[in-house]
Amino acid sequence: MRKEFNFFDNNQPWFSTGIIGLQLNIPIFDGMRKHSQVKQTEYTLKSLEADRQKLTKNLEVALENSISQLQNSSASIGAQEQNVALAQEVYDTTNDLYKEGISPLTDLLEAEVSLREAKTNLNNEMLKYQLAQLGYLKATGDLNSLIK
């Protein structure tokens, strides 16, 4: 810097200069960004809480259903065991009558078919009971206990 505008004259002294700068950023208006972020986070928390409550309710219902399936299957097994005993008794009686020549072969065959059907139904009910046990283990979270 000089008093006159002459850069090529070396006889005139130069004034020493210094520059100090400061930049200050103060956001006055952020476009409601922070407010919307807070609202979004609150909404996410409410949504997660609702999902947690739904999951808890679904697990409770699944447990209740599995318990009732176990009870129903157990009762059905008892009924099917009685049917097998009755069909066995009918078959034995019909077989004795057939051996004595009183009952025809068709009656014996029908009794045998009924006995086999009763045994098949009992096996199906036992399978349903095992499936209900698996459902119960799944509902209680103990399904991994089968692996050990």
Image: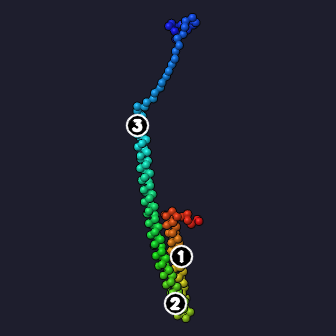
Mark closest to the chain's N terminus, 2 or 3: 3
- Dot 2 lies on which element? helix
Q: CA distance from mark 2 to mark 3?
A: 90 Å
* Residue 43 seen from this side: yes
Q: Which mark is residue 60?
A: none
Discs 2/3, front? 3
Q: Which mark is residue 93?
A: 2
At 42% from the left and 38% from the top, the residue drawn is 34
Discs 1/3, front? 3
Q: Which mark is residue 123?
A: 1
Q: Which mark is residue 32?
A: 3
Q: CA distance from mark 1 to mark 3?
A: 68 Å
- Dot 3 lies on which element? loop
Tags 1 and 2 touching, CB below 8 Å:
no
The amino acid sitting under disc 3 is: Met
Front-lying residue, 88 or 138: 138
Assess disc 1: are there few (<14), some (14-19) or many (≥20) residues with their C-alpha within 10 Å of its C-alpha: some
The amino acid sitting under disc 2 is: Thr
Tags 2 and 3 touching, CB below 8 Å:
no
